[in-house]
Image: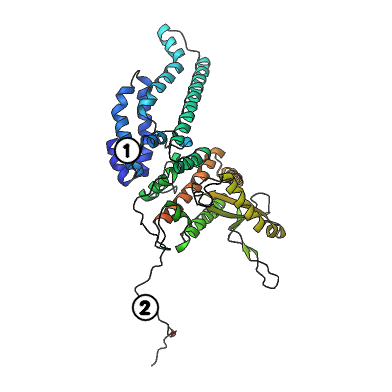
Amino acid sequence: MKILSEVAKKQPHAAYIAVSKAMQNEWNYLQRIFPDSAELFSPLRQTLFNDFFPTLTGATLSDTEINIIEKPTRMAGLGIRDPVASAQISFETSRKATTKLCESILTGNAVDIDSYENDLKLVTREMKKNKNEADLLRTQQLINMLPEEKSVKLRRIFDNKCSTWLSIIPTNDNFFALSPDEFRDAIALRYHFTPKGLPSMCDGCSESFDLCHTLNCKKGGLVTARHNEFRDLNCDLCSMAGLSQIISEPILQESNENEDLEGLRADWSVRGFWDSQRTALFDVCIFNADASSLKNQPLQSVFNAKKNLKKSKYCKAAAARRASFTPVIASCEAILDNEAEIYVKRLATIMSKKWKTSYSRVLSYVRARFQICIIRSVSLCLRGSRTKWRGAGFVDHAAIPMNILEID
């Protein structure tokens, strides 16, 4: 664990996967076979809480935050469990699940495989249910103990599906490997930490530079880039699903000054997405739920307001072109609106048929691609420059033709 704490300084994403997917399973195996082993894991717990978690997140953590981080990812944690607290539960689950097998070994009687498997599933399901209920209650208590801004953020993460990216094993080939800055920025956004290495003033508008401002400031085009990255990803995924006539930024309505018609263009269009041979139009909005104008509103109310705004703008023009329109609304934490969730599920259904693989596997893949795309674009808003770069060369304004005739 100390070695992985050193690795986490330069490769936090790789170190996180190594602990959560590999090392944790090794100590869980030991917990299942040795009784009363909780105290033996105290040194591991100390290294995990005092060295690994602070290095991984790049932040100074309170006891409450550490206790939240060790909870499952679906409960706003990172899924690396406390080895001392989980030791007794793991052993009791193993002992109860193998009772029939132990009796058969001691008595020499044959094992009824069907009875043993049914008993194994029943015990495992019951212990898992009890553990989840205890984790659920404890996580809610811990979130309520945090300052208001952090508790609101974590309650939002806790209540919505935005943690799939933490369960995917990253490689450079599957687009899920995050750089150190991208990973720590994602953790900072998730737990409302202050990212390290940020300037005190915004280089675009000279305002105070904090996490909230950087997600809102449109200077330099970084917020627009966040939008465009998500648009391009969806075009790529629709192409991978085998869909036809995918157009980026299709013109929905031409402007007409005489008739006061506003020019409209969607973000992407796909033929045959919802209905056979019918064009489906989509337009995306990614917003900062912690903005001063939104933070006091319920998340669903913000989703409804932005969705209704998109529909009032595009639906009439889309109907005139015999096309359907779907707004895709998401927060900077990669929380999707209900209609966006339906879009994701439909896309996963089409891709699973194209790839001839299970729907659940493809759904996880699509969710993770969405979340990683938003995470990277948010990190760009934090780390990118909002001022223009100037080249050192000169610009020729003489408009001299470059074709030179040969003269004998």
**What residue do we see at 59% from left, 55% from top?**
283
Check disc 1 and report its element: helix, strand or loop. Answer: helix
Q: Position of residue 359 (x, y in %)?
A: 56, 39
- The residue wearing badge 1 is 52
Q: Position of residue 312 (x, y in %)?
A: 66, 56
Q: Amino acid at mark 2?
A: Phe
Query: Can you see residue 301?
Result: yes
**Which of the marked residues, 1 or 2, is nearer the chain's N terminus?**
1
Image-based side of 57 in relation to 312, left or right: left
Q: Quick one: 194 or 4, which is closer to the camera? A: 194
Quadrant where the C terminus sits is: bottom left
Q: Quick one: 188 or 24, which is closer to the camera? A: 188
Image-based side of 319 in relation to 343, left or right: right
Give the residue furthest to the top: 107
- For the residues labelled 1 and 2, the Cα–Cα distance comes to 51 Å
Disc 2 crowd, CA 10 A, few/some/many (<14, 14-19, 20+): few
Check disc 2 and report its element: helix, strand or loop. Answer: loop
Colour setting: rainbow
Disc 1 crowd, CA 10 A, few/some/many (<14, 14-19, 20+): many
Q: Position of residue 129 (x, y in %)?
A: 51, 25
Residue 394 disc label:
2
Quadrant where the N terminus sits is: top left
Give the residue furthest to the bottom: 408
